[in-house]
Image (tube, grey):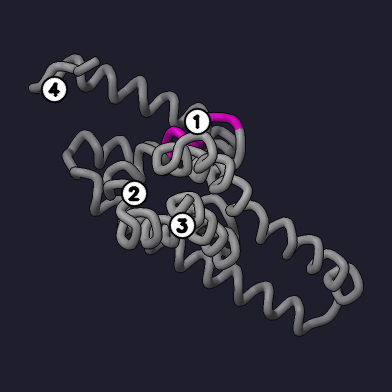
Amino acid sequence: MKKTTELFFSFLKIGAFTIGGGYAMIPLMQQEIVEKKKWLKPEEVIDMVAISESTPGVLAVNFATYVGYRVAGVWGSIVATLSVVLPAFIIILLLSTVLAAYSDNSLIQAILKGIKAGVVVLLIRAIVKLIKICKLTPFNIVLIISTILVSLLVKGIVFYIIISGAIIGIIYGLIFAKETFKA
């Protein structure tokens, strides 16, 4: 019961205090799940982002479901998943009525622009943390740069980028890795 309660409040906080969803949640997830609760290791965050992005559904929901299951089994996954979406559901319900009435208000527009700028900063910080966790090799650097270029040129291909990265990683591992793959 204690673990599900911890999951509930941790993911409720992540869901409530992350504006922008998806990748914008990564810094708070790292802080809460890795640094504070120690439910995942830092390098596992990268794996979870890759898995969460390559499976159907929203990153935060997939991530919460995985962490919840890992910490407290099926009930943990249910609690974590519901608690991460609950704040967004309530906030969207309330804000949609306010924004519908005041969408042309210049103050509301200015607030939204400020929030967007803050989200960009959080994303950059998350990227820097994830890059530090990756063991940067010439191969990884080339893969990161080429992936960024492809994603800037072609829209809507996240799934294909992740699958391609996995395939390239497997091929690289089979050809150049010093260790054999462990089943």
**Residue lying at the far front of the rendered structure:** 1
* Amino acid type at image mark 2: Trp
Front label number (1 vs 2): 2
Front label number (4 vs 2): 2
Q: CA distance from mark 1 to mark 3?
A: 27 Å
In the picture, the disc for residue 39 is 2
**Residue behind mark 4:** 177
Q: CA distance from mark 1 to mark 2?
A: 22 Å
* Amino acid type at image mark 1: Ser
Determine the secondary structure under disc 4. Answer: loop
Determine the secondary structure under disc 1. Answer: helix
* Amino acid type at image mark 3: Glu
In the image, 30 versus 160, the foreground residue is 30
**Residue behind mark 3:** 6
Pointer 1 and pointer 2: residues touching (CB < 8 Å)? no
Determine the secondary structure under disc 2. Answer: loop
Q: CA distance from mark 1 to mark 4?
A: 24 Å
Percent position of residue 78, x then y: 58, 41
Front label number (1 vs 3): 3
Earlier in the chain: of badge 4 and badge 2, it is: 2
In the image, 150 versus 65, the foreground residue is 65
Q: Residues within 10 Å of mark 2 (few under 14, many from 20)?
A: some
Earlier in the chain: of badge 1 and badge 2, it is: 2
Look at the image and give the residue range highlighted in magenta: 49-56
**Residue behind mark 1:** 54
Percent position of residue 1, x then y: 48, 50
Identified at 24% across, 50% down, the residue is 133
Identified at 43% across, 51% down, the residue is 3
